[in-house]
Image (tube, rainbow, N blue to C red):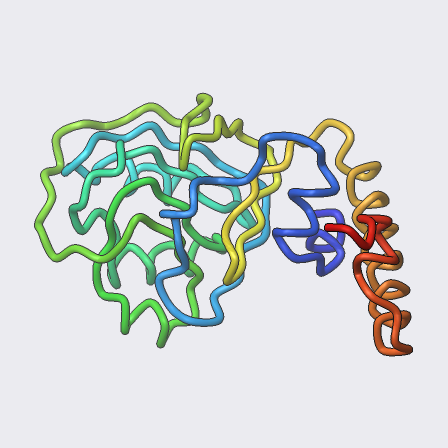
C-alpha cells in the first residue's frame, strides 16, 4: 500500500500529515526492530476476551494489519497460536489497545505486534466482537482501510483519503532535513538555520 509508506518513519509521517494521527506512546512494539505497515482491518473486542481476534484472523483480507480495541486491558489477548494462524492467512501484523503474551515467540516468528504490553493473564472466548467498524486505539480513531505504520518510535494511523499527497509532503520533509543536516556538518547552527535568534 503506497509502497509501504515509502520507507518513512512514523515521526516524519506524523509531522507531514498535520493531523492527530500519532497513537498514545504507551502502545509499543512487542519485540525490538518490529515494523508494521499495511491497511487496517478493525476489530472491536472486549477486555479479557479474545474471541473477536480469532474471528478477525479468518475474516481479514490477506495483507491487512489487525487493529483491535480491547480497552487497554492487560490480558494475554494474542499469542503464538493466533500468530501462526495470522501468518497462514497472510496478515501483516497486529496493533492492539490491550495486552499480549508469548513475546519471545512473536519475535521468533518475526510477526510485528504493537500493544499496551505483555500479560500472561488468560482470556475468555465469549464476546464475538464487531469487525470493520471504527475503533479507538491509543486515543486515535481508526477506520478499516487506514494505513497503519509502526516503528521503534510509535504508531501512526493515516487516513486513506489524500494519502499520496501526504507521502509527497513526507518526501519533501526528508529532503529538507537532509539539507539541514548537511549544513550543520558544515558548521552552521540550528539557531541560525531555523531563525530562532541568537538571544534564545
- Decide: is 14 above or below 182: above
Residue in the picture at 59% in, 48% down: 38
Relative to 61, does residue 187 appear above or below in the rendering? below
Query: Which of the 4 quarters of the picture holds residue 181?
Result: bottom right
Percent from the top left, x then y, of residue 178?
A: 85, 65
Q: Nearer the viewer, residue 185 or 11?
A: 185
Residue 131, x across and y down, in percent: 39, 27
Quadrant of the image occupied by residue 29? bottom left
Q: How many marks?
A: 0
In the picture, measured across the screen, residue 123 lies left or right of residue 31, that is: left
The vertical placement of 69 against 1, above or below, is: above
Residue toward you, 139 or 76: 139
120 vs 116, left or right, is left
Q: Is residue 27 left or right of residue 140?
A: left
Residue at coordinates 65% horizontally, 57% vertically from top-left?
Answer: 9
- At which x and y percent is residue 148? 56, 44
Residue at 63% x, 36% y is: 158
**Residue at (76, 56) in percent of width and height:** 6
Amino acid at each position: 500500500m503506497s509502497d509501504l509508506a515509502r520507507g518513512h518513519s512514523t515521526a516524519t509521517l506524523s509531522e507531514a500529515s498535520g493531523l492527530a494521527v500519532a497513537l498514545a506512546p504507551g502502545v509499543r512494539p512487542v519485540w525490538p526492530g518490529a515494523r508494521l505497515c499495511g491497511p487496517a482491518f478493525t476489530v472491536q473486542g472486549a477486555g479479557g476476551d479474545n474471541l473477536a481476534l480469532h474471528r478477525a484472523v479468518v475474516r481479514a483480507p490477506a495483507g491487512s494489519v489487525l487493529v483491535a480495541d480491547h480497552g487497554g486491558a492487560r490480558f494475554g489477548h494474542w499469542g503464538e497460536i493466533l500468530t501462526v494462524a495470522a501468518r497462514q492467512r497472510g496478515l501483516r501484523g497486529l496493533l492492539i489497545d490491550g495486552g499480549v503474551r508469548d513475546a519471545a515467540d512473536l519475535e521468533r516468528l518475526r510477526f510485528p505486534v504493537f500493544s499496551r504490553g505483555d500479560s500472561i493473564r488468560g482470556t475468555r472466548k465469549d464476546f464475538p466482537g464487531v469487525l470493520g467498524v471504527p475503533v479507538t486505539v491509543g486515543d486515535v480513531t481508526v477506520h478499516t482501510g487506514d494505513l497503519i505504520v509502526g516503528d521503534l518510535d510509535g504508531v501512526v494511523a493515516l487516513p486513506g483519503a489524500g494519502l499520496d499527497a501526504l507521502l509527497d509532503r513526507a518526501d519533501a520533509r526528508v529532503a529538507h532535513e537532509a539539507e539541514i543536516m548537511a549544513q550543520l556538518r558544515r558548521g552552521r547552527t540550528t539557531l541560525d538555520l531555523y531563525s530562532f535568534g541568537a538571544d534564545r
